[in-house]
Amino acid sequence: MSIKLSLPLKKEDIKKLKAGDSVTLTGELYTARDAAHKRFYEMVLSGEKLPINIKNETIYYVGPAPAKPGSVIGPCGPTSSYRMDKYTPMLLDMGLCAMIGKGERSDEVIDAIKRNGAVYFAAIGGAAALISKSIVKDEYVCFEDLQTESVHKYTVKDFPCIVAIDSFGNDVYK
């Protein structure tokens, strides 16, 4: 049975999650891949304000395919999360509460998840067409020059994923 969660996530809901739990997410989340993460990182280091307030937000690591006519979005499966690992601890320390991707995370990211009471969800790789059916709205946010790696805000309904690393550092990959 899947745990239904609303976005933005509440800290008390995150604390109840255990690695391996099946969840569905409903609400708004942001998309960002490695190029956007690198830009966020550089902006923070140079003292610039981020174009989004990431406090209590969820970021989905995705680069969607073009939408077919009449569709909100094309296939949009998760990308490998390790590519964001250099930048993730800083974002978690700034208030990011959840990430969605696929694959293992570094020890530094796991430590930051525990330190900040955050959570890492795994979406099912190879299920891009299925996942796209959970996305009911797609809004461009920033970094248009990054094309498919630009930041978007998705409104999702019953977005399926699994708790890969819970707020206590329990990890389904280990």
Image (tube, helix red, strand yellow):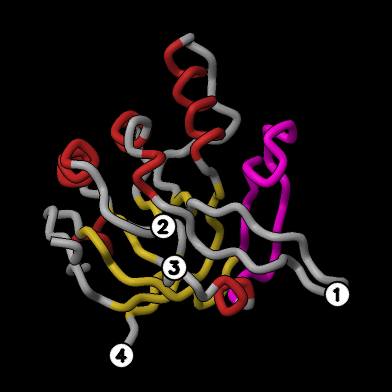
Q: Of circles 4 and 1, which is in front?
A: 1
Q: Secondary structure at mark 4?
A: loop
Q: Position of residue 118 (x, y in %)?
A: 26, 50
Above or below for 79 versus 22: above
Question: Which residues fall within the magenta stretch?
Answer: 134-155
Question: Along the polypeptide, which appears first: circle 1 or circle 3?
Answer: 3
Q: Of circles 4 and 3, which is in front?
A: 4
Q: CA distance from mark 4 to mark 3?
A: 16 Å
The residue at which mark 2 appears reads as 100
Residue 59: within the magenta? no
Disc 1 and disc 2 in contact, CB within 8 angstroms: no
Question: Along the polypeptide, which appears first: circle 4 or circle 3?
Answer: 4
Question: Along the polypeptide, which appears first: circle 3 or circle 2?
Answer: 3
Q: Secondary structure at mark 1?
A: loop
Question: Along the polypeptide, which appears first: circle 4 or circle 1?
Answer: 4
Q: Secondary structure at mark 2?
A: strand
Above or below for 127 versus 67: below
